[in-house]
């Protein structure tokens, strides 16, 4: 699915075959995970995308209380690696989660951050072959 990010307007591909297409609008309508004054909207958006990719409900407050802080650091790091480009961060999350699911590897947001160099190499090869 290609759509535009509701925050920056950039084109965002958000496909998680295991769970179907992620609707960006549904992420916007969901109740906030935490106080947005303390967290960037892009980081919150990326956290929702991660939860959807893993199959967690977007508004699961119990999950938020237990795990949000742990994965928020990784979400911020993923955005930082892509210089705040939410579109690239979502593309990387979607591609790597699909790849790791096909391999049968358990993954989380920290795993995706560690795999950014491999994703960048594959993207470079794709663009070179195009």
Image (tube, rainbow, N blue to C red):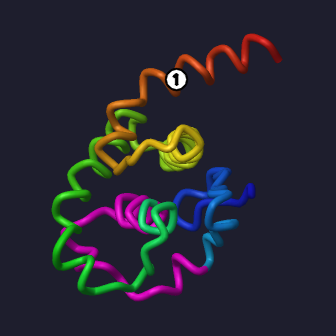
Q: Residue at x 54, y 17 (%)?
A: 121
Give the quadrant of residue 24.
Answer: bottom right
> From the viewer's perspective, is 68 left or right of 22?
left
Q: Residues within 10 Å of mark 1 (few under 14, many from 20)?
A: few
> Where does residue 85 sit, x and y in percent of width and height?
48, 43
* Residue at screen point 40% across, 30% down: 115
Q: Provide residue 88's location: percent of width, then percent of height.
A: 54, 41
Q: Is residue 109 magenta?
A: no
Indicate the position of residue 86 as horizontal and vertical percent values.
49, 49
The location of residue 23, given as percent across then percent down, is 65, 72
Eyeballing the image, is 37 above or below 130? below
Query: Which residue is depicted at the point 42% across and 35% down?
Result: 82
Span of residues in magenta:
26-49
Secondary element under disc 1, as helix, strand or loop, is: helix
**For the N terminus, which image quadrant?**
bottom right
Judging depth in this view, the residue of 84 and 33 nearest the camera is: 33
Reading the image, the residue beneath label 1 is: 120
């Amino acid at each position: 699915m290609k759509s535009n990010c509701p925050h920056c307007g950039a084109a965002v591909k958000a496909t998680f075959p295991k769970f179907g297409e992620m609707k960006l609008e549904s992420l916007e309508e969901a109740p906030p995970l935490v106080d947005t004054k303390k967290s960037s909207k892009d980081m919150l958006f990326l956290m929702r995308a991660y939860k959807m990719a893993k199959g967690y409900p977007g508004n699961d407050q119990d999950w938020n209380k237990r795990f949000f802080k742990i994965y928020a650091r990784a979400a911020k790091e993923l955005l930082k690696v892509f210089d705040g480009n939410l579109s690239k961060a979502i593309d990387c999350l979607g591609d790597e989660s699909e790849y790791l699911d096909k391999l049968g590897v358990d993954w989380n947001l920290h795993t995706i951050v560690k795999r950014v160099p491999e994703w960048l190499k594959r993207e470079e090869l794709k663009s070179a072959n195009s």
